[in-house]
Structures are given as structure tokens and as C-alpha cells.
Image: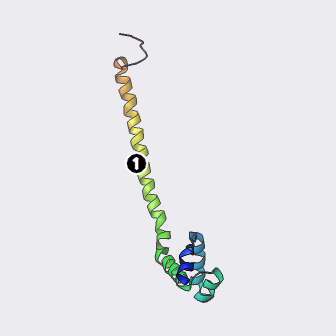
Amino acid sequence: MNATRRSKRTRRKYTGEFKAKVALEAIKAQETINQIAGRHEVHPHQVTQWKQQLLGQAAAAFDQPASLSQSNGVEEELYAQIGRLKMELEWLKKKLGPFQLGGASGHDR
């Protein structure tokens, strides 16, 4: 009978914001893990897992700006390349002016 009841139960999904809030409370250690878990209606083991996950990934929060600055360098390089290609295109248009196909000359064959 218990097995039937458990299979019908849906798995709860928690947002990242909720997990971070609970994990921060556990890190502060103003209450026991059991008290935090009881107040938020989650298993104490889950609180401990979220706490460990937050502590393990905390350094990545500070590394993020470095990766953003690297992507900005790539972005600047791409914009510079676009500028060079536009200049080349304009130069070619000037040099090939009379020879352009489908140009404004209006000659029909």
C-alpha cells in the first residue's frame, strides 16, 4: 500500500533562487540544518547538498567577469574585422564601378 502512495507522489522542483536562499542560511549557521530543513519543508540531506554545491561553485561567481572581459576582446576583434571588410568592399566597388553586373547603367542585352 505504501509503494502505491509513493509512486503517485510528484517530485518537487525548486528554483535556483530558493536553493541559494536555503544554502546561504545553512552557511550562516544561525540555525541547525534540521531547523532550516523543517522550516522550508525539505530533507536535511538536501540542505547539506545545496550548501556544498554553493560552496563549491562560489569561486565561479568571481571568475565570471574575467570570462566576460575575454569575450569583449573577441567582440572588439570581430568589429574591427567587419570594419576592414567594409573598407575593402567600398574600395572594390570604386575600382569595379564601370564593370559591375546589374549596375545602374540600365543596359539590356
Who's the residue at 57% across and 71% down the image? 14
Q: Residue 4 sits in which quadrant?
A: bottom right
Who's the residue at 38% across and 37% down the image? 85
Q: Amino acid at mark 1?
A: Glu
Q: Vertically, is 58 above or below 82?
A: below
Who's the residue at 34% across and 18% down the image? 99
- Observer-nearest of 9 and 41: 9
Badge 1 crowding class, 10 Å Cα cut-off, few under 14, some 14 to 19, many 20 or more, is few
Q: Vertically, is 60 above or below 74?
A: below
Who's the residue at 40% across and 29% down the image? 90
Q: Quadrant of the N terminus?
A: bottom right
Residue corresponding to mark 1: 77
Q: Residue 9 sits in which quadrant?
A: bottom right
Q: Position of residue 80 (x, y in %)?
A: 41, 44
Q: Quadrant of the C terminus?
A: top left
Relative horizontal placement of residue 98, taking residue 32 as reference (left or right): left
Relative horizontal placement of residue 99, taking residue 48 as reference (left or right): left
Q: Vertically, is 24 above or below 32?
A: above
Q: Vertically, is 57 above or below 105?
A: below
Residue at the outermost front position: 1
Secondary structure beneath dot 1 equals helix
- Observer-nearest of 88 and 48: 48
